[in-house]
Amino acid sequence: MVKYNKLYKDRSDYVLNRQLIEDTLNAALSTGGDFAEVFVEDRTNNGIVMIGGKVESTMSGRDYGVGVRIFKGFNSVYAYTNKSDRDTLIATAKKAAAAIEGTKADITLNLEKSDVKNINTIRIDPNSIEKTRKVQLMRRAYDTAFNYSDLITQVTVSYTDYTQNIMVANTEGLWREDTRVRSRLGISSVASKNGEMQSGFFGPGASKGYEFFENLDVDHYAKEASRIAVTMVNAKYSPSGKMPVIIDNGFGGVIFHEACGHGLEATSVAKGLSVFSGKLGQQIASPLLTAIDDGSIPGEWGSFSIDDEGTKSQRNVLIESGVLKGYMIDKLNARRMKMDITGSGRRQSYRFAPTSRMSNTFIDNGKSTPEEIIANTERGIYARHMGGGSVNPSTGEFNFAVMEGYIVENGKIKEPVRGATLIGKGTDILKKIDMVGNNLLQSQGMCGSVSGSIPANVGQPMIRVSEITVGGREGEK
């Protein structure tokens, strides 16, 4: 296991001393704020992109900065700087405080530094690995993917690792530090035939060091990316209309993430902008469905020991047997909602104020086997792998592309189909889930929202929705 002080030789490179933290917080409260927070980030990034078997670009760098946030009631002000000298921090805090009108409250600071148990064990610091070794890993993925078929015309491989050190301190006395290490490999294959192109993609990642890549079945993911592309370029077009749809495990969970998960974040719930506002305790989904957000799963891509407000990560049951049980709640929106925080305050970097965000969000296991789900479907679409899509968070209406799809007929998977899109509304889809599998799988992605782009897992077992509108090629039935 890599110890904290080996990832950064001198913690004083980024950690502020107690007196400077207290002075900055006092400056932030100088105009009447009732809460203030200091967030420090020191991050090392490494990224490589390979196109056509050649390294197209490399990126290595260090990003450092400090953010100051102030609350007064339900209002919030945020300012940041990439300097940490005393004069700059005090000036930044005072500039933020200038947006608040009032009289300084009599608040006594009593910072108490507490240890953080890191839930993600790091064995090999990725910064200690030479770039040539990382490129060799990428070339292996490229060669496997490109040589899968003569129809593969382009393969892009991306490598990412980063080490993020943070410190959070606030006027409630909290003072915590954490180190986060994440690693990811992306493989995208394009197949071409008769002037048409189809693509396949896999992007496995984890909250682990370079040991993640040493234990990763690179050939499997490379072959799968190319297999999807080749299968789809040879497929006929999907039929359209309303029909049952089986959505496979893993990245199939992106539909719940987008169409429902964002609507369960306090960012929208607290302002009444979510279709799920005011529905705690109500039956909002099929009794077969239980959905969870859990940032405390060791080693997962979306996991963290503490969130970006310094709160320990935890398991949050959002929906249980179809009943809405909870939301994902950050500190500011906890005030608005008069509810407890849930360890869901996240941000891309010090340049963003945190807000409620997902971590590892998934539909939990049910009791059906995948074989039972398929065998009990007379006719429909099997979405083996999902692609991208768009969602209106205020209504839950979505439109998602199926990256790899098949016809299901008489309880059997038949020929592949391409061009399928799933169109619907999250609240409706939740109620139409009539079978839930027992093969839960997590997949990795990046989630964008008002506090930037953050790592997040999506996941589910295989599920069946009794009816979804499938968009296909006009004329295909």
Image (cartoon, rainbow, N blue to C red):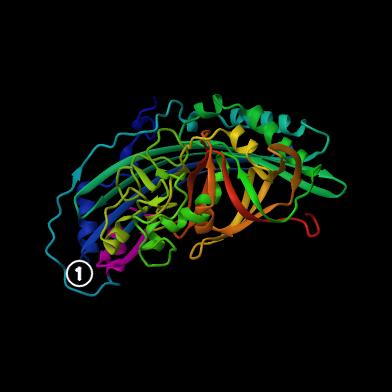
Q: Is residue 467 visible?
A: yes
Q: Does residue 126 sit above or below 286 in this rendering?
A: above
Quadrant hosting residue 49? top right
- Residue at 29%, 54% (x, y): give it: 38
The spot of residue 160 in percent (x, y) is 55, 39
Residue, x 45% and y 60% (percent of image)? 450
Look at the picture and state if 123 lies above or below 273: above
Q: Foreground residue, 293 or 155?
A: 293
The residue most toward the bottom is: 101
User: Which residue corresponds to the image point at 47% horizontal and 31% vertical from the top-left?
Assistant: 209
Quarter the N terminus occupies: top left
Residue 449 spot, x, y in % from top left: 48, 58
Nearer to me, 131 or 215: 215
Query: Is there any visible trace of residue 136 in the rendered image?
Result: no
Q: Report the residue marked by disc 1.
A: 32
Magenta-colored span: 70-97
Position in image of residue 200 (x %, y %): 69, 42
Q: Name the residue nearer the viewer: 121 or 436.
A: 436
Magenta stretch containing residue 85, yes or no? yes
Q: Name the quarter where the C terminus is drawn.
A: bottom right
Answer left or right for 18 relative to 120: left
Q: Residue 128: x percent and y percent?
A: 49, 29
Picture quarter containing residue 279? bottom left
Identify the amino acid type marked 1. Answer: Gly
Local crowd size for mark 1, using a 10 Å CA cut-off: few (<14), some (14–19), many (≥20): some
